[in-house]
Amino acid sequence: MQGLWKRLSTAVIFVIIMIAGMYTGPYTFNLLFLVITGGCLYEFFGMTLDRHTRRDRVRKAFGVAVGLLPFVLISFFSLGYVSDPASFIQVSSLLFAPFIFTIFIYELYSNSREPFVNIAYIILGLFYIGIPFALVEFIAFDGETFYYRIVFGLLLLTWVNDTGAYLVGSRFGKTPLFPRISPNKTWEGSVGGAVTCILFGYLLHLVFDEINLIQWLVLAAIVAVFGGIGDLVESMLKRSVGVKDSGDLLPGHGGLLDRFDAFIFVIPFAAAYILYLR
């Protein structure tokens, strides 16, 4: 019972912070997702990179900085600090490319036993976490219009899909979905999560009218498919490095990456669809 209350209290506080960050304006929205991106990157490199010496800690900090760079650059553009797209591309290229190749220079002098493994993990963190969260900016901002409720709706769909899959799977689940990676996940749970997600997508269009019913249902279908895959991908990562949770920041829930693994995988596909609509 104590563990249940811990999970519930953590979930309530977490949701309040998320709502406050998204509903209080573009600056708090960007700050919220900057912190989430940095936290997920920190946990990712905590699992994948050695962290026993000062050089390992420097490498980890460098990986977080590299992963945050796309989000920071696009945030400046979204908030109107850089109004000319051509100038934005030029500045981004000047900052981004040299920064990436600095990784190789650092490893050259780090005396690491596996320098290219470290480089690969840092670049993986950039593509697996940094770039997807940067794409949130393209969903939330379209010129001077701030579509924060679409992002919030995607988060709600992701959590509803996960909750529906857990409840249906724990009650009716019999057929393993991917036993090699996640023995507890079942096909019945996945179908239950998808149905719950689609139904919730219908309810969302009644409240969030930025996009119409069909578009919310398409986004719900995207979440139902790719959210589950994102959860499996993070399970594969944790199995490969031998950890149970990505971190312990959220008592009863694990780490930030554990909470956002499905959302991270949803963002690229949802962003592609929303940009296609626009």
Image (cartoon, grey):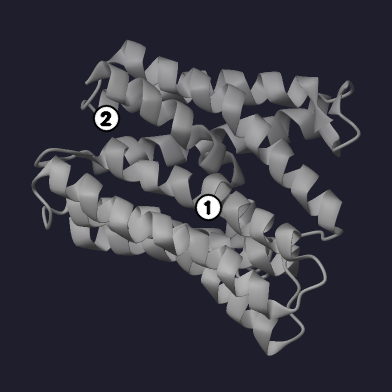
Residue 56 image label: none
Q: Residue at x 21, y 61 (%)?
A: 27
Find residue 65 and report its horizontal and vertical position in percent.
46, 68
Find disc 1 in the rendering and name its residue: 126
Q: Residue at x 30, y 18 (%)?
A: 276
Which quarter of the figure has residue 153?
Answer: top left
Relative horizontal placement of residue 89, taking residue 45 as reference (left or right): left
Say whether residue 104 is visible.
yes
Residue 207 image label: 2
Relative horizontal placement of residue 80, taking residue 105 as reference (left or right): left
Find residue 130 and report its horizontal and vertical position in percent.
48, 52
Find residue 266 and report its horizontal and vertical position in percent.
51, 33
How packed is label 2: few (under 14 Cα within 10 Å), some, or many (20 or more)? few
Residue toward you, 225 or 276 = 276
Q: Are marks 2 and 1 in contact (CB under 8 Å)?
A: no
User: Compared to 177, does 214 lie above or below?
Assistant: above
Mark toward the start of the polypeptide (2 vs 1): 1
Which quarter of the figure has residue 47?
Answer: bottom right
Q: Amino acid at mark 1?
A: Leu
How packed is label 1: few (under 14 Cα within 10 Å), some, or many (20 or more)? many
Callout 2 secondary element:
helix
Find residue 257 and report its horizontal and vertical position in percent.
60, 55
Q: Amino acid at mark 2?
A: Val
